Image (cartoon, rainbow, N blue to C red):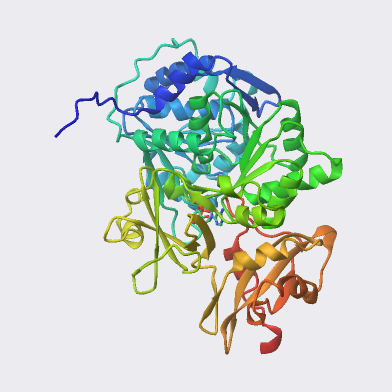
Amino acid sequence: MHAMMMNRPLSVIEVLRYAAEIHGSGEIVSVRTEGDLHRQSYAKTFARTGQLAHGLDALGVGQGDRVATLAWNGYRHFELYYAISGMGAVCHTINPRLSAEQMLYIIGHAGDRILFVDVTFIPILEALADQLPKGLELVAMTDAAHMPDSKLDLICYEDLLGDHPAEYDWPDLPENTAAGLCYTSGTTGNPKGSLYSHRSTVLHALFVAVTLPRSLHEGARLLPVVPMFHVNSWGMPYAAPLVGASLIMPGAKLDGASLFDLMQSEKVTASWGVPTVWLGLRAEIEARSVPPSTLDQLVIGGSAAPRSMIAFFEDQGIDVCHAWGMTEMSPIGTTGQLSIDMQDAPFDDRMARKALQGRRMFGVDLKLVGQDSQRLPHDGVAVGELFVRGNAVISGYFNDEAATAAVMDSDGWFGTGDVASITPDGYLGIQDRSKDLIKSGGEWISSIDLENVAMSHPDVANCAVIAISHPKWDERPVLVVQGKEGAQPELESFHALMAPHFAKWQLPDDVLYVDTLPLTATGKVSKLMLRKQFADYVLPEAR
Ligand code: ADP
C-alpha cells in the first residue's frame, strides 16, 4: 500500500534557505585571498547566492551543466556550492594539488563549462592555458579592485553578481538530480568521479549532524581545515547551516600558528581535518603551552589518527573523534565518539577505543568479506575486505563503467579496498588499504598498526611503513621516518617500543630517514611516492 504523505524532494538550496530564515546569528567568517577577514550572515549568503544564480544564468549555465571550482575554503566557494546545485547544475570541485595532467583529465572527463578560480591558483591555469578545453569560461573569485593581470580571459566574480536581484526562482528538482561531482585523487589509475545527488547530500548532512552533535549545534563555531575541494569538506558546508553552526573558513593559511590564532580570535569550538594538519597544531600548542581556549572537539579522519596524537589532544581537554570514510561515501562512514559504557573507563582504555575508526553512522551498512567471498563475523578478530552500502554511497563512478565494475559486488555493495575488522559492539578497525598491507611469508602485517606505535616515539615528527620486496619472505616492512629537528632514532629504539604489541616477525627490518614525507593531493602521506622513492633500496639482510 502506498503511503499518503507529500513527496517533497530533498534539495540542497533548502538547507541554505532554512539557515537564512532560522539561524539569523549564524555566519561565515573567511580569511580571504584579498588578505583580510570577511564576515557574512547566512541570510546575506543566501541573498548573494540568488544573485550568483542569475549571473550563472547570464553565462548560459543550464541544468545538468558541470561548473567547476578551484578554490580554498571561503564564502564565495560556499555560495558557488549552493547556487550551482540550486539551479540544477553540478558543482564540480577540483583539487588544486593534483598534477596538471590529472587536472586536465578531470576537467575533460567532467565536461566542465565554466571554472571558478581563486586568484592564488590562476598561475596553475596560465601554465595550462593552451591545453584547457576551448570554450571553458574562467571566473576569478575576487572583486574588480583585486583582479590580477593575466594573459587569461577572466570574468570577475563580484561583477558576475553585479546588481542582480537576490530573489531567484529556484527550480523544484527531482531529488535524484545530480548536485555535486568530486573525483578521487587517483593514486591508482585515472581519477574517478563520485556524482552526488540532492538527496544524498541532504541526507548525509542530516546523518552527520545527528552523529556529531558536539561539533554541530546552534552557536557552534566550526573550522573546516579539510578543504572544500576534498569531498565537500566532509559535508560541513551543508551540515553547519542546517544546525545553525557558523563556519570559520581558513583560506590558504593552514599552518599550525595560523590555525591556532584563528581558533583563538574566532572562538572556534570544533575543527575537522586529516592527521597531518594536526601535527602542526600540536607543535603550536606545545610551543605556547596552552590549547586554543574554546576548542572542544577535533574530528580526525582521512587516514589513521595515531593513538599518541589522540591522547595528546585529549590530555589538553579537547575531545577527539576519529572518523573514517571515502569520497565515494560523501564521505563519512564511521565516527569514533565513545559509547556511554566506555565514557568512565580508564584513560588508556578510552584511547585504545578512540584509535579504532568508530561506529557506523546511521544510513551506512558495513560488511566484511573474506578471501572466498564469504561474509565474515563482526567479532573483532576476523579481518576482511570492507564493503559498504547506504543512502549517500555511490552506485557507480561517473561515466566509467570499467571502474564501476571493479568496485561493485553482485548484491550492490561498494568494495572500499580497505581491509578491516569490526568488534561485536560495532567499532571498525581499519588495518590498511589492501594495496598498503605488507605480505610477509604468507601472513599480513598492518602498516597502520606499526605507524601508530612509531608515532609515539619522542623523536618522530611523522612516519610511514612501506613494503620492500624480499627474496624469501616476499615483502618486509620498512619504517620511513621524518625526525623531529632532524633526529635519526635507531631501529632498536623502535623495536623496543613495538615489541610489547607485535610478534617479532612483524617488526620493521630497517628504518630510513627523510627530511619530509611526500603528501598526496589530499594531505595524506603518499605511500605510492615513497615506494617509488625507495624502489632501489635493498634490505640489510638481502644485501
Ligand atoms: P583519496 O585519499 O584517494 O583521495 P579518500 O579521501 O576518499 O580518497 O580516501 C579514502 C581512504 O582513506 C579510505 O578508503 C581509507 O583507506 C583511508 N582512510 C580514511 N579515513 C581513515 C581512517 N580514519 N583511518 C584509516 N584510514 C582512513
Q: Where residue 217 sits: x, y (%)?
A: 56, 28
- From the viewer's side, name the closer residue of 330 and 195: 330
Residue shown at 57% from the left, 65% from the top: 528
**Closer to the camera in the image, 25 or 253:** 25
Confirm whether residue 97 shows in the render: no
Q: Quadrant of the C terminus?
A: bottom right
Check the image and report above or below for 17 versus 299. Answer: above
Quarter of the image for residue 204 reads top left
387 sits to left or right of 4: right
Describe residue 114's horizontal placement relative to residue 270 as left or right: left
**Residue 84 horizontal side relative to residue 158, left or right:** left
Looking at the rendered structure, the number of numbered marks drawn on it comes to 0
In this rendering, would 495 be left or right of 443? Answer: right
* Residue at x 40% of width, y 33% of height: 202
Residue sitting at 45 percent across and 16 percent down? 51
Residue toward you, 170 or 490: 490
The extreme left residue here reads 1
Specify the quadrant of the image occupied by residue 5. Answer: top left
> Where 19 falls versus 300 (above or below)?
above
Residue 388 at what x, y percent from top left? Answer: 39, 54
Query: Which is more toward the observer, 97 or 114?
Result: 97
Vertical position of residue 225 compared to residue 383: above or below = above
Q: Split into 4 quadrants, where in the image is the N terminus?
A: top left
Instruction: Give coordinates of residue 81: x percent, y percent.
Output: 46, 30
